[in-house]
């Protein structure tokens, strides 16, 4: 009696265990497929309420797989353990993957029963498809290769970017396909071999150029790791990131840097040049000032010594003072930067014809001395300029023409328009300028022939002032000359410089 009660208790306990088991469990009578028992988990896994299925033939709710069930029954042997994976259509229509374990046993009523334990494979399926999803949708190129370097798998991004189909790629090496060429191929091969030969099992990272099927070039950063199976390297898997754009910027930055460096170098050189020009200027200026001051000193000493003066000596003092004055005013001009624009404001519609006639009149005494005829070929011209600067420009050109002209010759001053540009020409028929010196005559203190030119009262600043004034007008000055036949200086004021807009 006691034994029976104990037994009953035990059966109840087993029933409870099965009811609360974490997997779906049901028992089916073999002879008519009737479900004899189903725990609550059945509902969770298969979507059928356990109350709904108990007492009903299994075939009522696995209608779509009757054949399979018939086959399965044949496979499950009494006392043997059977395990398989399959899909299952739930009551709500969802098809899920399941893993089930089963066995067949004979009970005390002499009948055979199947007992099933069913588990959803949701977790594993999800994990698998998640990796698949990541692999296929990654923005990087993902691939695996075998020990010969032949592709075993590649993701969509890889195929799409490089224009190959999976069939074309799988089974071939990157070298064979021409994906990686030249030095990059050597680098990739070296990295691959090192890992495959297990010299290093760690990951590797290198950058190579990859050529697509259509010839587009990509620069990629590859990080690859050996695939290890049972302590042996069986291949490599790699992730390649397209860094073409970043590299382009990197190159751009490098070239900008180089440009900057060159500019700084150029500026420094210019600065050094300017500094040495300044030193030169200082030396020249002191020389130029010393000469007239020595003359003045001598004359003054003479007057002091003799306590009397000869009027002509005073005249030479006046001449030298004049020379110093001119030099200082010229110097103050050439020392100014061209960008300086407060001292000489420009105005529109200045009648330069008037200025030119004025200059010619002012220099009449000099032309008269050499019996020169100044021929004017003008039309009335107005332009954007500064009166003093234009005057200075023409004065310097005309003074030179007079200085270097032979006696009794003509000097021609032309002014005309070419379209919207204004052209000013001063031509003489004098000594002219040797071809090889033409380049230098606009430099400060440059004189073609010091013994010849200094005697004419100049110090080599006249043309540098001309150049300075022309640059201020954003114009161009040039010279045409044949030694011994004369010189023609031409200034072109372009549309902008002549109109001021
Ligand atoms: P300078 O005060 O010595 O005339 P410039 O700067 O005006 O200095 O001219 C520089 C040099 O160019 C002169 O020394 C001279 O040798 C040459 N030069 C200028 N104008 C003429 C010209 N019309 N004919 C011949 N040589 C000229």
Image: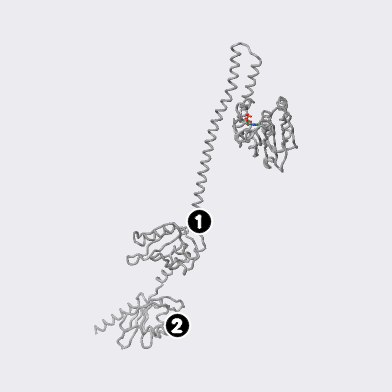
Q: Does residue 493 appear to the left or right of 169 in the view shown?
A: right
Question: Please, what secondary structure does the residue beneath circle 2 have?
Answer: helix
Query: 404 or 104: which is nearer to us?
Result: 404
Q: Does residue 237 appear to the left or right of 377 in the view shown?
A: left
Q: Does residue 132 appear to the left or right of 306 in the view shown?
A: left
Q: Residue furthest top?
A: 307
Can residue 242 be seen here? The reply is: yes
Question: Please, what secondary structure does the residue beneath circle 1 have?
Answer: helix
Q: Residue furthest front?
A: 484
Query: 42 or 397: which is nearer to us?
Result: 397
Residue at position x 41%, y 79% in the image: 49
Residue at position x 64%, y 35% in the image: 469
In the rendered image, which residue does mark 2 sit on?
64
Q: Does residue 107 appear to the left or right of 426 in the view shown?
A: left
Quadrant in the rendering for residue 113 = bottom left
Mark 1: few/some/many CA within 10 Å (<14, 14-19, 20+): few
Task: Residue 493 in the image: state x and y as whole percent.
Answer: 68, 39
Question: Which image quarter holds the N terminus?
Answer: bottom left
In the rendered image, which residue does mark 1 sit on?
245
Check residue 111 in the rendering and tell me which mark sits there, or answer none: none
Q: Is mark 2 within 8 Å of ligand 1?
A: no
Quadrant in the rendering for residue 292 = top right
């Amino acid at each position: 009696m006691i034994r029976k009660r104990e037994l009953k208790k035990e059966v109840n306990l087993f029933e409870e265990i099965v009811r609360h088991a974490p997997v779906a469990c049901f028992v089916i009578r073999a002879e008519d497929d009737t479900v004899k028992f189903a725990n609550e988990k059945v509902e969770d896994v298969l979507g059928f309420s356990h109350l709904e299925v108990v007492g009903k033939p299994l075939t009522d709710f696995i209608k779509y797989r009757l054949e399979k069930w018939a086959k399965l029954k044949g496979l499950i042997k009494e006392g043997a353990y059977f395990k398989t994976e399959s899909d299952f259509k739930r009551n709500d229509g969802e098809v899920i993957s399941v893993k089930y374990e089963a066995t067949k046993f004979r009970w005390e009523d002499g009948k055979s029963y199947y007992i099933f334990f069913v588990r959803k494979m949701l977790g594993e399926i999800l994990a698998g498809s998640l990796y698949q999803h990541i692999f296929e949708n990654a923005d990087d190129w993902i691939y695996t290769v075998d020990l010969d370097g032949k592709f075993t798998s590649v993701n969509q991004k890889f195929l799409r970017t490089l224009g190959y189909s999976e069939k074309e790629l799988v089974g071939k090496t990157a070298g064979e396909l021409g994906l990686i060429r030249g030095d990059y191929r050597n680098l990739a091969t070296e990295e691959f071999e090192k890992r495959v030969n297990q010299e290093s099992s760690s990951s590797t990272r290198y950058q190579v150029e990859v050529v697509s099927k259509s010839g587009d070039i990509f620069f990629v950063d590859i990080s690859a790791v050996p695939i290890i199976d049972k302590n042996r390297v069986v291949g490599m898997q790699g992730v390649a990131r397209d860094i073409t754009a970043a590299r382009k910027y990197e190159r751009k930055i490098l070239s900008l840097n180089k440009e900057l460096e060159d500019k700084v170098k150029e500026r420094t050189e210019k600065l050094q040049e300017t500094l040495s020009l300044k030193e030169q200027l200082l030396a020249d200026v002191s020389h130029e000032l010393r000469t007239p001051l020595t003359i003045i000193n001598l004359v003054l000493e003479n007057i002091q010594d003799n306590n009397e003066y000869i009027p002509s000596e005073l005249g030479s003092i006046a001449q030298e003072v004049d020379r110093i004055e001119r030099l200082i005013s010229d110097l103050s001009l050439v020392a100014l930067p061209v960008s300086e624009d407060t001292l000489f404001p420009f105005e529109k519609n200045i009648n330069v014809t008037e200025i030119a006639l004025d200059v010619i009149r002012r220099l009449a005494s000099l032309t008269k001395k050499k019996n020169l005829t100044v021929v004017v070929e003008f039309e009335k011209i107005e332009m954007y300029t500064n009166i003093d600067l234009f005057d200075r420009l023409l004065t310097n050109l005309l003074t030179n023409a007079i200085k270097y002209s032979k006696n009794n010759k003509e000097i021609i001053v032309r002014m005309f328009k070419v379209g919207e540009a204004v052209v000013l020409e001063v031509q003489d028929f004098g000594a002219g300028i040797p071809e090889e010196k033409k380049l230098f005559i606009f430099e400060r203190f440059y004189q073609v022939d010091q013994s010849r030119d200094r005697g004419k009262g100049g110090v080599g600043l006249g043309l540098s002032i001309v150049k300075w004034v022309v640059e201020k007008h954003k114009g161009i000055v040039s010279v045409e000359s044949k030694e011994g036949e004369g010189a023609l200086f031409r200034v072109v004021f372009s549309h902008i410089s002549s109109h001021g807009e």
